[in-house]
Image (cartoon, rainbow, N blue to C red):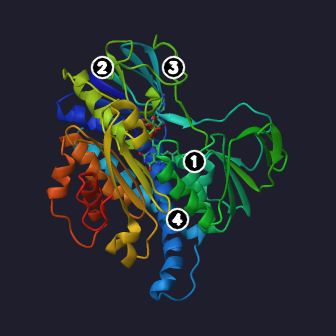
Amino acid sequence: MYDFVVVGGGPAGYPAAIRAAQLDAKVLLVEKDELGGTCLNVGCIPSKLYLHAASMAFEIERARQSGLEGDFSIAPDKLRAHKEATIARLKKGIESLLMANKIRLAHETAIFLDEKTLQVGAERIKAEHFLIATGSSPLVPPIQGIAQQGVWTSTEALELKNVPKTLVIVGAGFVGLEMAMVYKALGSRVTLVDMLPRLLPMLDADMAALMERSLKAKGISLVLGARLVRIEPGPRPVFLKEGKEEAFLSDAVLLAIGRTPNLFGLERLPLGPADKGIFVNEGLQTRISNIYAAGDVTGRTFLAHAATHQGILAAENALGGENALDLENLPVPNCLYTDPEAAWVGLSETKAKERFGDVRTGTYLYGALGRALASNEPLGKIKVIANSKDGKILGAQIVGKAATEIIHEATLAMSAGITLSGIAAAVHAHPSFSEGIKEACLEALGTPLHKAPR
Ligand SMILES: Cc1cc2nc3c(=O)[nH]c(=O)nc-3n(C[C@H](O)[C@H](O)[C@H](O)COP(=O)(O)OP(=O)(O)OC[C@H]3O[C@@H](n4cnc5c(N)ncnc54)[C@H](O)[C@@H]3O)c2cc1C
């Protein structure tokens, strides 16, 4: 009999297993495929490794202005080998952690027989508490022509088996935008299509416009307000835009339209409707009191760090804790590792105004930031949004180099209740990208230093 059994060894599952072991529980982790889940094997890590190469390629082009000379190229085979070695290294790290924490790992498919019994390969396992952390898979819409060669999901795109001359990407979200950068750097002609009328609606329009500008500058075509209706042989995707059909020539089509929860093995549990994710309460408990769920399978936030946060809270709760997840107000950074990067946390200016009426905002342009100019990275903008009553940070949005790192200053400020004046009072290194956050806070306070007063 185990105290805690985790199904799924991704970013929600394996940290939960470690946390439970730290709390002296007897723990079993069941993973049918590869440790690390989507994130390590076909998600965050491979995509970021390719994006690093892509960003370097774009940066080298820009660096010609700084005197860098010479030719270079990206060798897809070597890049793929580097990806595989990196994944193997990180996976070994997880295996050692599980061993060091005395967690039993079963490489099997788990199937629930009832709320206390799990079939794990040939074994029947009993436990007090379970965590469902089975993650998600790419969403493939049931439309004509979807099952033909050359139609990819992110998994095939990350295999990097070939570089198509022309790639049409359906969906301009995280995956679509990041893969557009990778394949553009590898030499494909890329068209990015989305059914929404605007790029990245979670960003304020001024911030999203910067991303749009940079896509265009790279020669990535962006088609908005167009819905995929079928894929003709070729593959030749056909979209409906403003009532008219438009077909695109392509050598490959990447579907990046979202993800769907993995529910295999859960069929016998009365979890309620789960096609959009398993219901959990604020304690991460499903409709069955001894079974918790965390990560993508809950359909809430499809992010690895959110999955880990939830997994840890769930493990603690299963073992007697009383954590409550306040998803509405928890500051979770969202990061796009494109070139330029984009990152945001909390409320946009638009949403903050809707919720609070009057808010304070401050912005700072990379074009005025010494570090950005010295690095040949003048395209970028930082925006902070704060409550005008108490100066508490409500959100931040950044487009530009290092956005995915410096967003954590705003995230920390939001978590710890640090105000605009608190950030402005801290000494920031010069020259640095983080200085831009301080400058934006100073502007929001009405005392901009390196910017004329509004
Ligand atoms: C291309 C791409 C890029 C991404 N980039 C980022 C990023 O940069 N940052 C970020 O935060 N997020 C990113 N994500 C999202 C991130 O990968 C997921 O949010 C994260 O992996 C979710 O973790 P999870 O543990 O909930 O599920 P998963 O990582 O999907 O893990 C679930 C695990 O459960 C196993 N499993 C399923 N059913 C069973 C069963 N019945 N028995 C046993 N095992 C089972 C699966 O094999 C899998 O290993 C990206 C995703 C994609 C596709």
The kind of residue tagged 2 is His
Marks 2/4: CA–CA distance:
40 Å
Q: Residue at x 45, y 18 (%)?
A: 112
The kind of residue tagged 1 is Leu
Q: Visible in this render: residue 266?
A: yes
Q: Nearer the viewer, mark 4 or mark 1?
A: 1
Corner quadrant of residue 275: top right
* Residue marked by disc 3: 274
Q: Residue at x 29, y 58 (%)?
A: 437
Whether the residues at callouts 2 and 1 have beta carbons within 8 Å, the answer is no
Q: Nearer the viewer, mark 4 or mark 3?
A: 3
Marks 3/1: CA–CA distance:
29 Å
Q: Residue at x 22, y 58 (%)?
A: 447
Q: Earlier in the sequence, mark 3 or mark 1?
A: 1
Q: Earlier in the sequence, mark 4 or mark 3?
A: 4
Corner quadrant of residue 393: top left
Q: Nearer the viewer, mark 3 or mark 1?
A: 1
Please tell me whether residue 411 is drawn above or below residue 399 in the rendered image. above
Q: Earlier in the sequence, mark 3 or mark 2?
A: 2
Q: Nearer the viewer, mark 2 or mark 1?
A: 1
Helix, strand or loop status at disc 3: loop
Within 8 Å: ligand 1 and the Cβ of disc 1?
Answer: no
The kind of residue tagged 4 is Ala
Marks 3/2: CA–CA distance:
20 Å
* Residue marked by disc 2: 129
Image coordinates of residue 401 in percent, x first then y, are: 41, 64
Within 8 Å: ligand 1 and the Cβ of disc 2?
Answer: no
Helix, strand or loop status at disc 4: helix
* Residue marked by disc 4: 81
Helix, strand or loop status at disc 1: loop
